[in-house]
Amino acid sequence: MAAVLMASPAQAEDQAAQQAQPAQPVQPAQAAAEPQPAAEDAASGNDPIIVTGSRISGGFTAPTPVTVLSNDRVQALAITNVGDALSQLPSFRATSSPATQATLGGNIGARILDLRGLGSVRTLVLVDGRRFVPSTSQGTVDINLIPSALVEQTQVVTGGASAAYGSDAVAGVVNFILDRDLTGLKAEAVYGISEQGDDESVFASLAGGARIGSGLHVTVAGEYEKSYGMGDCYTRDWCATQTLILQNPAFGTNGLPANLIVPGVNTATVAPGGLINRSYNAAGQAIGTNATDPLRGTTFTADGTPRDFDYGTLVGPLFMLGGEGNGRNSFISPFRLKVPVERYSIYGNATLDITPGLRAKLDVSYGRVQGEVVGNVLRDFNGSLLGQIKADNAFLPDDVAAAMADNGVASFILGKADFDLGPARAKSSTETYRVVAALEGDISSSWSWDLSYQYGRTNFRQDTYNSIILANLRKATDSVLVGGNAVCRVNADASTTNDDPNCVAYNPFGEGQFSAGAAGYIAGDGFQTTRYDQHVVAANLQGDLINLPAGPVKLAIGGEYRSDKIVGETDAISAQNQFWSLNGTALAGSVNVKEAYAELAVPVFRDSALGYALDLNGAIRRTDYSTSGAVTTWKAGAVYEPFDGVRLRITRSRDIRAPNLAELVGPLVKSAIGLTDPRNGEQANPTIYTGSNPNLRPEKADSWTIGAAITPRSGGAVGRMRLSVDYYAIEVSDAIGVLGAQTLANRCQEGVSEFCDLITRDSVTGSILEIRDVMVNSNELRTSGFDIEYQYRQPLGGAGRLDLSLLANFVNTLTLVDPAGETNRAGQNGVRTGTVPGVPDYVLDGMLSWTLDDLKLTAQGRYIPEGIFWTNFVGPDSTWYDVTSLQSVSNNHVPDRFYLNLSAQYTLRLGDDREFQLFGAINNALDKDPPIMPGAGGGTNQILYDPVGRSFKIGIRARLGG
């Protein structure tokens, strides 16, 4: 296996040059060659060089940095999904993965790439240079559906590339290069499990290729993977601490800040058996205060017997410190730390040489991903869901009824965490079909063309089970006795217009004290289906325009027509957002896109007094969207080599992203989260609506990339080194996205009136009832930083060889600008529910491999420095810390983490055409727990940190023939 596991941007063109040559079968333990020369030396004649940063073929070195993830790295670390391998790279943020889904429905278990932390919709995914059919209604691609078994390498353009490839390439492009020339068979089987016995997984793949006759080559591959996931928060000690954000009701007066991030936080206003929070008289007025309310603090045992609730300290509207309820906090249970996922993929391609200058290609693929998620249990602390319990409720315990009569209580609010009804569950299935038919030809020795048609379809279905129907819950809870039998009040009152013959009275006191009929009436099943169809017709022409002393001027021109259509259905209850959680959505819309582009590469000089080489590159693309009109994108760049082996490069580009169909025509989806009301510092649990906005405008991005690559061609120690350093700056105007419910509430309080229009408050109490966190064109989104890659190879004579690679991404800014000002999320290592995630100040990824004959040992280290939990909080380590401020917090610090992964592989060779490789890996070998902090999926930020702990993989690879 090649020991250089990551190619630097400077080597991208070098490795890409190999694409023109017939690829050899993957040899798991192949000895690595010495570092290759630059592309212009490696290529000869008219052999094409495929570089994702440019559509120009030939010896031109593209000015855009291109990082290459080789299959060797994936195999060395025993990674079975290329999406997981990419998410490890410092420039990516693993926003969507099986470890970040928690209670979210939709494409459950999807692995969706997010380059630069700019949002997955701004990362364009290609397969062999062509768009892959979207897997989601947002237009993003689930990498699970791309056949990892045939991915030869993955090229990542870490900069704008819309002029070359079209819309969505704001953050960059990820291009999966497949092995189209495989001969013989190769197979792989892997088994994995965590040290604690969960996160079990199995993987198997088989690929084969053959040349038939003199002009036809066929490749077929299939793979299967099943991950069983993890349990809930209480299956890990670090998460079972119940570390949450606790509101300090007396902040500024008791010497403590307004927000406390502490362990041992329990719910103060909801309990599994029910908890009386407030009493009201016949006029609907609250009786007394919290301290003098005659019924407040009455809870119920599992059998419905009333007793006193054990309050802790610092009791607030949602949480308290200590008290009862440990192990049953409904804000972190019962959803999983990692959801189970099962995936299949089948891929086949054929290449037919019709004549020496004409080729036909056909690609056919099918993939299916299935996932399952456990939703939230119902939580109602203010009666907004259950309604108020009246004095004549059919199930009211006698002691409580007597206390109500003695104290003039006509009704009360019952806080309920409905573990007994159970959480909703959702299962999703995403199927993707894709067919690509292409013709490629040579006009002359220096000109070539290609014409292709692509059809793709994604069928998505989500089925939900045991979802609580809000209207039915309220009717079933409000019951009375008629003839000694409990019946729903709507069927017993004088009115007949509100009768519901299906209604079965529900007993909310205790746990499981209701009938099966009541549970069947309150909870129901739902569904969602979505079909996404895409047609693409594309034509490209490229070749040498004229010859200059420094070489040929190369031109590429082309056009593309794309049609995207989405249709969907959902159940009647979801259509009204009447399930407590996991409501389905129905989409309908279409967009047609017409594009034309041109790219020019000009070699200015070679071996002159001004330097070794200078190349200029420019591209322009005109894109016309049926939904948002026409836009122009462009790029201009240069590569200057003052001396051989030292390459300086610069690129300036204008990129665009038009709103996708889900952002324009999708429905609103309802959920509920806990947040802090910035008006009074109280915690709230409002209804959140997220979804589309038909008034969205296309976003525009201006990008700069300036860098240098050192690739010495001399021998010795210097010649074994590769180094590249690139600075990037991307500024997106009219950026499309949700700001997060907590952010909207904060910005409204800071005076942004347009955000206040999205918030509904109770007319009497002023508490937040709902927030419409819909898509908006926020003012700007900016990011800037540095990418660094370093490689070194050291021969050890008879003791083998050492290979070292280091990747680093340093982020200066990741800033969202709205009418209230700027928020820089660089260095924000935590993620608060209802807010947009940030990125660390930097991430380091290093690999050291030792190869001796057929044995290879690899150590990978990943370092995430310390950071802050949330940008809106001010902790004691800040000079702005003030315990009287609503933004003050007891601890806004997230400690650093270092993860070490170890692997070994040994190859057994049985002749020239047969070999077997045994391998194993220990991930998180030091068994490092993630930093403990509040998180959307439990007790940490699972976008950045490993929730599994030490885990193991073992497997075998085989190659036969070829």
Image (tube, grey):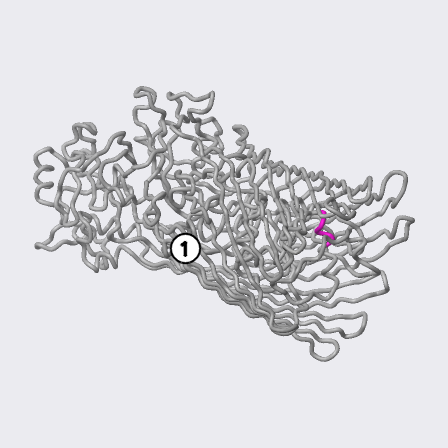
Front-most of 698 and 475? 698
Which quadrant would the N terminus be assigned to in this image? bottom right
Q: Quadrant of residue 951?
A: bottom left
**Residue 232 picture location, percent across and down:** 34, 50
Q: Amino acid at mark 1?
A: Ser
User: In the picture, which quadrant includes the C terminus?
Assistant: bottom right
User: What residue is rendered at 88% in x and 51% in y?
Assistant: 551
- Residue 223 in view (yes/no): no
> The residue tagged with tag 1: helix, strand or loop?
strand
Q: Quadrant of residue 332?
A: top left
Q: Which residue is mark 1?
A: 194
Magenta-drawn stretch, dominant element (helix, strand or loop): helix
Q: Is residue 857 left or right of residue 247?
A: right
Q: Is residue 17 or residue 32 the one in the foreground?
A: 32
Crowding at label 1, few (<14), some or many (≥20) Cα neighbours within 10 Å?
A: some
Residue 938 in percent (x, y) is at 38, 44
Q: Position of residue 222 (x, y in %)?
A: 55, 69
Residue at x 68%, y 40% (from the top left corner): 725
- Left or right of 233: which side holds 655? right
**How many numbered dots are placed on residues in this image?**
1
Q: Is residue 488 visible?
A: yes
Q: Is residue 180 left or right of residue 500?
A: right
- Up the image or down, 746 lies above or below 51; here it is above
| Span of residues in magenta | 10-14
User: Going 51% across and 40% down the picture, which residue do you hit?
Assistant: 864
Specify the quadrant of the image occupied by residue 607: top right
Residue 190 percent coordinates (x, y)? 49, 63
730 left or right, relative to 255: right
